[in-house]
Amino acid sequence: MKLNRNRLRIVLGLAIICLALPGVLRAQEAEGIYKKKCAVCHGKDGLGKTAKGKKVHVKTVAENMSHSVADQIKIVQEGKGNDMDGYKKEFGLDEIKGLVDYYRSLANK
């Protein structure tokens, strides 16, 4: 009986890890995309205090929180004026959602 309980605990633990792993991998992927494509203007911390960010008057992540998630997704897809390229051809909707979630998480750091 005790052996079955231990096996059950192991199986449940592995199931939890397997369920959580895709979310962790998506978050890591979004962070990598952000650092590669966005940080040059928005900064690694989301404050927009980079040379290019200052040149194009990038708002901080806190200031951009007034935009809804849907609005931010659209901005990433379509771009913003001449200052920000759109990425809908380069990234899928799930990747863009992850990117927006990562960006918004910078407001909490």
Image: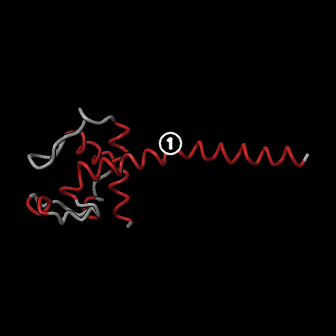
Query: What colouring does the structure picture have?
Result: secondary structure
The image quadrant where one finds the C terminus is bottom left
Q: Is residue 91 above or below residue 46?
A: above
The image quadrant where one finds the N terminus is top right
Question: Which amino acid, by three-letter code, is at mark 1?
Answer: Pro
Q: Nearer the viewer, residue 106 or 4?
A: 4
SS of the residue at dot 1?
helix
Give the crowd class for mark 1: few <14, some 14-19, many >=20 residues within 10 Å. few
Numbered marks: total: 1
Q: Is residue 18 above or below residue 45?
A: above
Q: Is residue 14 above or below residue 106?
A: above
Q: Quadrant of residue 26?
A: top left
Q: Nearer the viewer, residue 22 or 86?
A: 22
Q: Residue furthest front?
A: 3
Residue 77 placed where, x, y %? 24, 39
Q: Is residue 99 above or below residue 45?
A: above
Residue 68 placement, left or right of 4: left
Q: Which residue is mark 1?
A: 22
Residue at image position (29%, 36%) is 91
Residue 88 placed where, x, y %? 25, 35
Q: Residue furthest top?
A: 89
Residue at image position (19%, 55%) is 40
Residue 53 placed where, x, y %? 14, 60
Residue at image position (78%, 44%) is 8
